């Protein structure tokens, strides 16, 4: 079974993208990369690019949560307590620890 995506461009032909239902995500990504490489129309490419960037921006905004003033104060107080009790790490320790991330 084929599933299709129709992208409409005013005053131009519509673009159809198809994928097979059984195709795994990795194969679909590689097919899309190949499709993008073959695009010669600047308008088509610009619309796809702007849609991707817009979606990425929206997703990054949705994942952010603003701290309340109380949360910020609590975090600052906790950090001060940890500093005063010697619960700190050197830059080298942090860099070494972050290599495993």
Image (cartoon, rainbow, N blue to C red):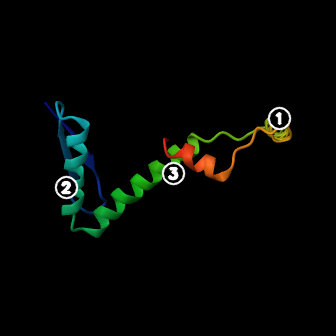
**Is 38 left or right of 79, judged from the image as shown?**
left
Query: SS at mark 3?
Result: helix
- The number of callouts visible is 3
Residue position for label 3:
57
The residue depicted at 29 percent of the width and 62 percent of the height is: 44
The residue depicted at 21 percent of the width and 48 percent of the height is: 30
Q: Is residue 22 above or below residue 19?
A: above
The residue depicted at 40 percent of the width and 53 percent of the height is: 51
Q: Looking at the picture, tell me which residue is in the foreground, 6 or 18.
A: 18
Residue position for label 2:
34
Residue position for label 1:
74
Q: Position of residue 84 (x, y in %)?
A: 86, 40
Q: Is residue 70 above or below residue 51?
A: above
Q: Is residue 47 above or below residue 22?
A: below
Query: SS at mark 1?
Result: helix
Q: Position of residue 31 (x, y in %)?
A: 19, 48
Q: Is residue 19 above or below residue 13?
A: above
**Is 20 left or right of 7, judged from the image as shown?**
left
Looking at marks 1 and 3 on the same chain, the residue that comes earlier in the sequence is marked by 3
Q: Looking at the picture, tell me which residue is in the foreground, 76 or 18.
A: 76
Looking at marks 3 and 2 on the same chain, the residue that comes earlier in the sequence is marked by 2
Badge 2: how crowded within 10 Å, few (<14), some, or many (20+)? few
Instruction: For marks 3 and 2, give the CA distance.
Output: 24 Å
Q: Are marks 1 and 3 in contact (CB under 8 Å)?
A: no
Badge 3: how crowded within 10 Å, few (<14), some, or many (20+)? few
Q: Quadrant of the N terminus?
A: top left
């Amino acid at each position: 079974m084929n599933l299709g995506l129709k992208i409409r461009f005013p005053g131009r032909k519509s673009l159809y993208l198809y994928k097979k239902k059984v195709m795994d995500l990795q194969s679909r990504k590689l097919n899309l990369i190949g499709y993008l490489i073959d695009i010669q129309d600047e308008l088509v490419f610009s619309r796809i690019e702007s849609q991707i960037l817009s979606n990425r921006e929206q997703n990054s905004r949705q994942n952010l949560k603003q701290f309340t003033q109380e949360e910020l104060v609590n975090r600052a107080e906790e950090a001060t307590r940890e500093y005063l009790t010697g619960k700190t790490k050197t830059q080298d320790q942090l860099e070494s620890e972050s290599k495993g991330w």
